[in-house]
Structures are given as structure tokens and as C-alpha cells.
Image (cartoon, rainbow, N blue to C red):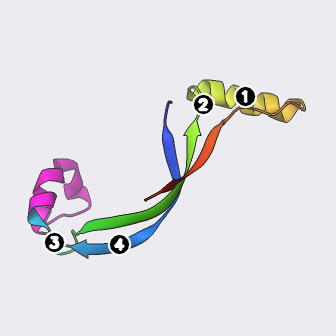
Amino acid sequence: MDARWLNAVRGRARMDRDDDTINELWSAAQKVFFPEGRNDPNLMVLRIRVLDAAYWEAADNFVARAFDFARGMLDESPSDLGEQGHLQG
């Protein structure tokens, strides 16, 4: 498995100002988006209780996927671009 990309997530979300989580996840690069730092009033923690999600698990690496995609466009054999699935929360 190279990478699993979530295409869709369904659930319930809430926002809060959990200072412990903000401090744990904070990095200097985020100051670009939140100029007032960790105390920026626009900075929130988004908590999601996932009910279900759809995903695509990529086959091989990017170059191999691009080659398989191009080959699939040129001939009639299906390309193996990965696996799709559904996860229950």
C-alpha cells in the first residue's frame, strides 16, 4: 500500500478552542495562516466523529500509476489504478 486517499468522509463535526491540542499541533509555519499565533481568535480545533468514509488506495508509485493510466487510454485492457473501498466508523 502506497497511500490511501479519503475521497469522502461523513460524520459529525464540532469546533472548539482546546489549548492543549493547539499547543501540541502548533508549528511556526502556521503563523502564515494565523498571524496572532496560538492565540489567534480564528484558530480552532475541528473534531470529527467519522460515521463512514470512502477511500482510494493507490497502486504502486506515481510513475507506475501514470504509465498504467496512459496504457489504459491507448488499449482496451483495464488499468490497475488501485482499490476503492468503504470504511464504517
Residue annotated with mark 3: 17
Residue under label 2:
59
Instruction: Classify mark 1: helix, strand or loop.
Output: helix
User: Residue 4: x percent and y percent?
Assistant: 49, 41
- Residue receiving disc 4: 13
Amino acid carrying label 2: it is Ala
Q: Which residues are magenta?
A: 20-39
In the picture, measured across the screen, residue 70 lies left or right of residue 89, that is right
Tag 4: amino acid: Ala
Mark 4 falls on what kind of element?
strand
Residue 88 lies, in percent from the top left, at: 48, 57
State whether residue 45 is above or below residue 84. Answer: below
Mark 1 residue type = Asp
Callout 4 environment at 10 Å: few (<14), some (14 to 19), or many (20+)?
A: few
Which one is nearer the viewer's eye here, 53 or 37? 53
**SS of the residue at dot 2?**
loop
**Quadrant of res 59:** top right
Q: Amino acid at mark 3?
A: Arg
CA distance separating discs 3 and 4: 14 Å
Q: Is residue 34 magenta?
A: yes
Q: Residues within 10 Å of mark 3 (few under 14, many from 20)?
A: some
Q: Is residue 64 left or right of residue 13?
A: right
Which of the two discs, 1 and 4, sits closer to the camera?
A: 4
**Who is closer to the viewer here, 59 or 69?**
59
Q: Is residue 66 visible?
A: yes
Q: Which is in the foreground here, disc 2 or disc 1?
A: 2
Q: CA distance from mark 1 to mark 4?
A: 38 Å
Label 1 close to label 4 by CB (< 8 Å) = no
Q: Which circle marks residue 68 in the picture?
A: 1
Image coordinates for residue 35, horizontal then vertical, percent: 18, 64
Q: CA distance from mark 3 to mark 2?
A: 39 Å
